[in-house]
Amino acid sequence: MTYLDADGQVQERFDWEMLRSGPVTLFRKPAVLAESVTWLERHDYTVAQADCENCRSEEEVLWAIGGALAFYRWPCPGLDGFNDDCRYIKVPTKGGFAVVLHRFDAVAVAFPEFARHVLDILARESWYNLLFGRRLICMVRSEDLWIQFGPVGGCEPRWNWREWSNADRV
């Protein structure tokens, strides 16, 4: 694995652009997200995608994300168990691992604190993996142009560089 360093070529990589502002990146347009996922797959990333739009309970959210990550389906999942399971995400040394949460804005509306905790767990796991040179990225798709989660893993999630300005998200 090539480590992210100050070399100009490495800095232009899409994964570097996402990780430099923190482990959680926001997306609005499905096409922008799809192109980003394609880039990651071409660069040896494993990508797990969870559709969170129709989740009606915190348990359903954890089942959706856990299913995408091939976690055991606990009958009564909770944040503590999710945190424990995230420690076993197999992040390859070549490329990396991306967790894509589709329509996570629906979760944020229904369960705002829970949504922030889920992202915080994934962000902290990303920081842990970076200590060993492994890249774990969380990509969150939202229809809400103004969504905010507060700090997760010590950083406020930011919009991807192609949708950075408000006009680019419309």
Image (cartoon, rainbow, N blue to C red):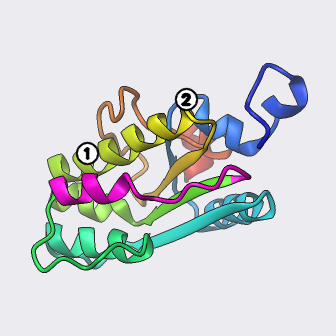
Question: Where in the figure is residue 101, as x and y percent of width and height?
Answer: 43, 63
In depth, the one of 104 and 83 nearer the eye is 83
Amino acid marked by disc 1: Arg
What kind of element bears circle 1? helix
Question: Where in the figure is residue 158, as x and y percent of width and height?
Answer: 49, 36
- Above or below, 31 against 156 in this view is below
> Sequence order check: which comes first, mark 2 or mark 1?
2
Question: Where in the figure is residue 105, as x and y percent of width and height?
Answer: 33, 58
Q: Residue at x 79, y 29 (%)?
A: 11
Quarter of the view holding residue 56: bottom left
Residue 52 in sight from this viewpoint: no
Q: Residue at x 54, y 48 (%)?
A: 137
- Above or below, 67 against 135 in this view is below
Question: Where in the figure is residue 134, as x and y percent of width and height?
Answer: 61, 43
What kind of element bears circle 2? loop
Near mark 1 (Cα within 10 A), the count class, few <14, some 14-19 or many ≥20, is some
Give me the C-alpha separation between circle 2 and circle 1: 17 Å
Which residues are drawn in magenta? Answer: 79-95
In depth, the one of 39 and 124 nearer the eye is 124
Residue at the farthest left position = 76
In depth, the one of 17 and 66 nearer the eye is 66
Quarter of the view holding residue 62: bottom left
- Residue 126 bears which disc, if any? none
Tell me if 108 is positioned left or right of 144 in this view: left
Q: Is residue 40 magenta?
A: no
Kindly indicate whether the residue at mark 1 contacts the one at mark 2 (C-beta within 8 angstroms): no
Q: Which residue is identified by label 2?
A: 21
Q: Which residue is identified by label 1?
A: 116
Quarter of the view holding residue 124: top left
Amino acid marked by disc 2: Ser
Q: Residue at x 68, y 36 (%)?
A: 17
